[in-house]
Each structure stands twice: as C-alpha cells, then as structure tokens.
C-alpha cells in the first residue's frame, strides 16, 4: 500500500483484507487455551499463555499499526505491560531514570519491587530538563516517562529526552495511556517503547483490565519470552472485547477531545472553580506544546474547587450523570479525588508540593453530550 491508511480505518480493520465467502464479519471469539497440533511438527505450539491465540494476535497487530511500531503485545493489565517492558529492558544492577510525574502503581512497582533485582531508580521532575542528563550514571540502561501526566495533564516533549537517551545509549520507554495512539504516538517522537493501559481508552468501556507494549520486533520478542514465563497473558474474551472497543477508538477520542475542551472552557469561568488543568486551555503551562504535539487535548481534566475538600465532597454527593469512581477513559464520565486514590500515599504536604491541593478533582469526560455533563456539574456545584 503506497498511501498511508487513516487511524479510524486501522482501528476497525487493521490491515484490510478481502474475506472469503460466508466468513463472519465480526471476529470469532476463540475461547480456547490450546489448539490441535500437527503430528511431528517442530513449530511453536499454539497456546493462549504464549500470546498466539488469534484474538490476542489480531489486537496486537492492530495496536502496532496505530502506534507505528514494528510489533506489539497485549498483557493482562497495564501494570503487567509496565513491569514486563522494564524487565525486558533492564538487567540486574542497572539504573533507571524515571520521571517523577508517573502513575502511583508504577512508582510503587519501582520503589518496592525493582530492588529485588538490584535495579535502582532516580526520579527527575520533567520541568527541570537539565536533570535528565545529570541523573544519568554509567549503569543507566533506560529512561521512563509518562505523558500526558495524571492529574495535572502536563505534556512532555519527548524529542529532547530521546536525544539524551540516544547519546547515552539508553532506551526510552513512554507510558502514553492518557493520550491513546489517536492523540499521541511516542515512537514518532523518538521513544523506543510505548506502554499503554488498554483498560483505558483502547478498550474504552470500563469492562476489561489489560495492557499493551509496542516497539521493535526484538524488544517485543523479549517481552513475549517474559510473558510466557511470568504468565500475565490476556484472556481471549478480554482480547475480543478490546477488539470490539478499538473499532470505535478514533470516533470516541474525537468526542472525548471535544467534551474535555467544552467542560474545561465552561469550568474555567465558574466562580466555584479556582483552577482548571487542561492542556487545551491557554492558561495551561503546556498549552503551546500540546497544540503542537497532540492530535487532541483529551478527555481528562483537573478541577480545583475554591472550597477545598468539603466543597469537593458536597459536589460529588450531588452528581447524577458523572459517576464517582477511580479509573478513566470509558464512554461514561468518571470523577475521582487524587487525595484519596492515586496520590493518597503522598500526604497533604506532598500533594500540595506537587500542585494537587485538597479539593482537587480529576474528571474523565466520557462521550455523553457535553451539555449534559456541564449541566450535571453546574447543578452539583450550585447545589
Ligand atoms: C491505569 C494506568 C496504569 C495501570 O493500568 P492497569 O490496566 O490498571 O493495570 C498505568 N499507567 C497509567 C497512566 C494508567 O492510567
């Protein structure tokens, strides 16, 4: 194919192919752990823990195309994807440089588990770009960052970080869950590996836990080897649901993007809202960067209520359309308080130093009608 196929078509068809007569239009669910084996065959067996079940293979191929990667692999959670991508990259005694603006579970994984392999981690605040190079050591093997970040929706420019990584001969891994490949594709900006929690936008319906890693053939081969041994492969039914979810990824992202912008714009002039964190607003510190780098500003926003924690609790108690629940990126809007979820461990001082005061709400705009989301927030705030 000479012309480049668009992401909506890719999300539906992967690589389009003519179907034989009388074949199903929807992919069959192959809910089988194992497969018949040709007698005397020396080929690798088909076995669902190996990641070669047709449902697993189909979504991996589609996701690799969306990211512009050679290949990809789905795992049983975003955390499994993060863990195995790092285990594939790092060796005992290695050093990892990580952004300090990362998912809480990832930080706990680094802090509590990597020590058992003798892997040390140095955290760098991405708003001090000089610190990346300063943090490098002779045994540094990789840099890990997340963009856009939770819950302040900071957007990172990967190009200078990728340049430092390349000069130092270390790998760059990027968790771009909050963007989805529709809004941002890290490999186009110099990353070696992209990690996504497929629980979020890729599946998009809050009914599956899954993760994905995309990168070079040799890297994904190593992640696959680890998956076979450590075991976090994806169940075929979950893979089938992700395939179903991914078909609408591009149109869902369009609505997430427009709802995020509509709600953020409305909230930015509401008297009960002290501050809105959304990269689509001119007030956001990364607005210009986000405009240059992202295909859309996304559905995630941070709302700081003027009335602090008590105002947040009052408002949460009145919401009708928007559901108070952790997680994000489903078709339904969800709202949570980072002080009680992702950033609980930091304590009030730690959070406030990060710019997450009490009264901070993280809103995941779903794909409902923007006017209904705004009306729900309005009645809940005005009470
Ligand atoms: C949710 C999330 C994860 C973890 O994904 P699970 O599917 O819950 O294991 C990792 N990174 C980011 C940015 C996330 O939002």
Image: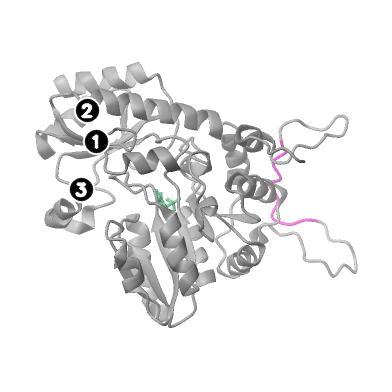
Secondary structure of the residue carrying tag 1 is loop
The residue that label 3 is drawn on is 339
Looking at the image, tell me whether mark 1 or mark 3 is earlier in sequence order.
1
Query: Is residue 327 in sight in this rendering?
Result: no
Figure check: 73 above or below 267: below
- Left of 204 or right of it: where is 299? left
Figure check: 365 above or below 72: above
Callout in the foreground (1, 3): 1
* Residue displayed at 38% across by 34% down: 299
Looking at the image, tell me whether mark 1 or mark 2 is earlier in sequence order.
2
Location of the N terminus (image quadrant): top right
Location of the C terminus (image quadrant): top left
**Labels 1 & 2 near each other (Cβ < 8 A):** yes
Secondary structure of the residue carrying tag 3 is loop
Label 1 C-beta lies within 8 Å of the nearest ligand 1 atom: no
The residue that label 1 is drawn on is 283
Callout in the foreground (1, 2): 1
- The span picked out in magenta is 27-35
Residue 133 image position (x, y, % from top left): 35, 70
The residue that label 2 is drawn on is 268
């Amino acid at each position: 194919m000479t012309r480049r196929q668009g992401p909506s078509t890719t999300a539906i068809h992967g690589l389009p192919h003519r179907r034989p007569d009388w074949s199903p239009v929807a992919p069959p669910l192959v809910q089988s752990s194992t497969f018949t084996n040709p007698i005397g065959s020396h080929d690798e067996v088909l076995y669902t823990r190996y990641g070669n079940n047709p449902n697993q293979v189909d979504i991996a191929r589609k996701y690799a195309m969306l990211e512009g990667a050679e290949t990809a692999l789905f795992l049983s959670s975003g955390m499994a994807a993060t863990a195995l991508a790092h285990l594939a990259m790092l060796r005992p005694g290695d050093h990892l440089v990580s952004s300090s603006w990362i998912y809480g579970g990832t930080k706990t994984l680094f802090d509590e588990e990597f020590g058992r392999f003798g892997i040390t981690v140095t955290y760098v605040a991405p708003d001090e770009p000089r610190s990346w190079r300063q943090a490098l050591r002779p045994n540094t093997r990789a840099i890990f960052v997340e963009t856009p970040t939770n819950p302040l929706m900071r957007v990172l420019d990967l190009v200078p970080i990728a340049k430092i990584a390349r000069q130092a001969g270390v790998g760059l891994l990027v968790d771009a869950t909050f963007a989805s490949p529709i809004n941002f594709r890290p490999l186009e900006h110099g990353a070696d590996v992209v990690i996504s929690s497929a629980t979020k936008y890729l599946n998009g319906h809050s009914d599956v836990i899954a993760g994905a890693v995309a990168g070079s053939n040799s890297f994904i081969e190593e992640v696959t080897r680890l998956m076979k041994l450590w075991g976090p492969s994806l169940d075929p039914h979950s893979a089938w649901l992700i395939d179903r979810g991914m078909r609408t990824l591009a149109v869902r992202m369009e609505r997430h993007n427009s709802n995020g912008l509509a709600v953020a714009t409305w909230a930015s002039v509401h008297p009960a809202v002290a501050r809105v964190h959304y990269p689509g607003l001119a007030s956001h510190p990364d607005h210009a960067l986000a405009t240059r780098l992202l295909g859309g500003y996304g559905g995630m926003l941070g709302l700081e209520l003027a009335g602090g924690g008590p105002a947040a609790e009052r408002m949460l108690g009145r919401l009708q359309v928007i559901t108070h629940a952790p997680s994000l990126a489903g078709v339904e809007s969800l709202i949570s308080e980072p002080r009680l979820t992702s950033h609980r461990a930091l304590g009030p001082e730690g959070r406030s130093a990060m710019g997450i005061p009490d009264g901070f709400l993280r809103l995941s705009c779903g794909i409902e009608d923007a006017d209904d989301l705004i009306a729900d927030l309005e009645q809940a705030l005005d009470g």
